Image: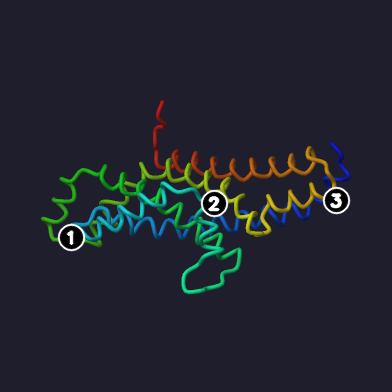
Amino acid sequence: MNGHLVSSYMPIFINGAIMTLEITLISIVCATILGFFVALMRLSNSKILRTISFLYVWIFRGTPLLLILFFVYYAPPFGIQLSAFIAGIIAMSINSASFKSEIIRAGILSVDKGQLEAAEAIGMSPMKRMFRILLPQAIRLIIPPYINNAVILLKESAQVSIITVPDLMLQAQKAYNSTYSPMETLGVAGVLYLAMSSLLMLLQFFCEKKLRISPKR
């Protein structure tokens, strides 16, 4: 391991890691919001909304992120020109939302319907039932698979380097092309990815402990 080479390229690795975290966190937020509404559509009494949401989940769970990324960046509708950064966020968000919607839907369905019926009987509005009865209980089951999905999204974000988003993977590729030293360049990138993933795993552990979630054995 060439320590001088690592130290000289470390600033660009750090910048790449920051970009990776930025695009991942923004995508997680967007995917959570979109996934929540898709989950509500799946649970709707409207056949049209259920059909639309089912097709959304079916299409985007069944197609690879890379394909969606290419479509958004190279073939956006109406001739719209998107930056690589925005295209990456959109592609990652709509792909991840299809998974998050199913996680959220499963969590909502796990809540005893009797509690919701009791809340409705005492005159609680749908909004209050959602935020006071449904979500506080559902979130206990949602958090573990939700953060697992976030870890997967973090690792899959490396694919945005293909459309020239200056993330950690692209910076590692540039460093390798300049030095032809895979141990130093790709190794450091791997360590940084592992560090970021570990932070999310620690967050999962903290949340599970805080909510007293017992891990499956």
Measure how far apart labels 2 and 3 are at the Cα level: 32 Å
- First reached walking from the N terminus: tag 3 or tag 1: 3
Going 56% across and 65% down the picture, which residue do you hit?
A: 86
Asked if 215 appears above or below 6 in the picture, the reply is above
> Residue 84, located in which quarter of the rendered image?
bottom right
Callout 3 secondary element: helix
Asked if 111 appears above or below 1 in the picture, the reply is below
Callout 2 secondary element: helix
Q: Nearer the viewer, residue 189 or 217?
A: 189
Please tell me how crowded label 1 is: few (under 14), some (14-19), or many (20+) other residues with Cα within 10 Å: some
Callout 1 secondary element: loop
Going 19% across and 60% down the picture, which residue do you hit?
A: 46
Q: What type is the residue that disc 3 sits on?
A: Ser
> Residue 216, located in which quarter of the rendered image?
top left
User: Disc 2 vs disc 3: which is toward the camera?
Assistant: 2
Q: At which x and y percent is residue 95?
A: 45, 53
* Pointer 2 with pointer 1, Cβ within 8 A: no
Please tell me how crowded label 2 is: few (under 14), some (14-19), or many (20+) other residues with Cα within 10 Å: some
**In the shown orientation, is residue 56 left or right of residue 119?**
right
Measure how far apart labels 3 and 1 are at the Cα level: 61 Å
The residue carrying mark 2 is 66
The residue carrying mark 1 is 124
Q: Nearer the viewer, residue 123 or 144?
A: 144
Q: At which x and y percent is residue 189?
A: 71, 44
Q: What type is the residue that disc 1 sits on?
A: Met
The residue carrying mark 3 is 8
- First reached walking from the N terminus: tag 2 or tag 1: 2
- First reached walking from the N terminus: tag 2 or tag 3: 3
Q: What type is the residue that disc 2 sits on?
A: Leu
Looking at this view, name the residue that lies furthest to the top.
217
Asked if 194 appears above or below 32 in the picture, the reply is above
Going 69% across and 40% down the picture, which residue do you hit?
A: 191
